[in-house]
Image (cartoon, grey):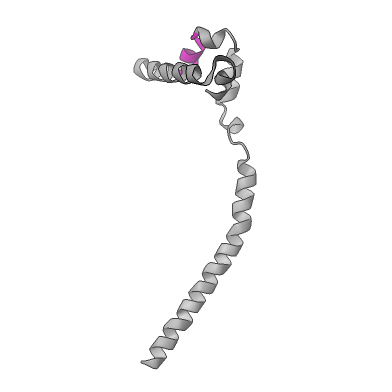
Amino acid sequence: MFELGTIIGKQTAHEVVYESAMTAIEQHRNFLEVLYQREEVNHYFKRSDLDEWAKAENDLGNISQRIELVVKNAGGVLAKGAWDLERDQVSREAITAKE
C-alpha cells in the first residue's frame, strides 16, 4: 500500500488494496494476482514489483538492530531482576528472624 501510494496517492492505494484483499478472500484467490489485475496497479508497476514488496524479509526493516538492542539490554534487566530477588530473600529472612 505504501509503495502504491507514492504514485496513486495514499487514499486511493488504501482503497485499491482493501478492495483487492476483500475480493481475494471472497473468491479464494491470490491477493497479489487480484491486486495486479487492477489498472491502477498494472499501469504503473510490474508484477515483479508486487512480488518483491510482499517478501517478508524485505519488510523486516531494522529488526536485527532492534534484536541486538533487546539482547544487550536483557543482561541489565536480568541482573537487576536477580538483585531484586536477592534483596527480597534477604528481606524475608530478616522478617522471619524478627518473629
Looking at the image, residue 2 sits to the left or right of residue 30; the answer is right
Q: Residue at x 63, y 43 (%)?
A: 64
The boundaries of the magenta stretch are: 31-38
Q: Quadrant of residue 9?
A: top right
Main SS, magenta residues: helix
Picture coordinates of residue 73, whole percent (x, y): 61, 58
Q: Is 87 rendered above or below residue 30?
A: below
Q: Residue at x 63, y 40 (%)?
A: 62
Picture coordinates of residue 6, whole percent (x, y): 59, 20
Does the rendering let one see residue 30? no
Is 49 contained in the magenta span? no
Picture coordinates of residue 50, whole percent (x, y): 57, 19
Total marks in image: 0
Picture coordinates of residue 29, whole percent (x, y): 41, 16
Q: Is 55 rendered above or below residue 8?
A: below
Is 36 contained in the magenta span? yes
Does the rendering let one see residue 40? yes
Q: Residue at x 48, y 15 (%)?
A: 35
Quadrant of the snapshot with the C terminus: bottom left
Q: Residue furthest bottom?
A: 98
Q: Is 42 rendered above or below residue 68?
A: above
Q: Is 11 rendered above or below residue 58?
A: above
Q: Quadrant of residue 95?
A: bottom left
Q: Residue at x 34, y 17 (%)?
A: 26
Relative depth, front residue between 1 and 85: 1
Looking at the image, residue 98 sits to the left or right of residue 55; the answer is left
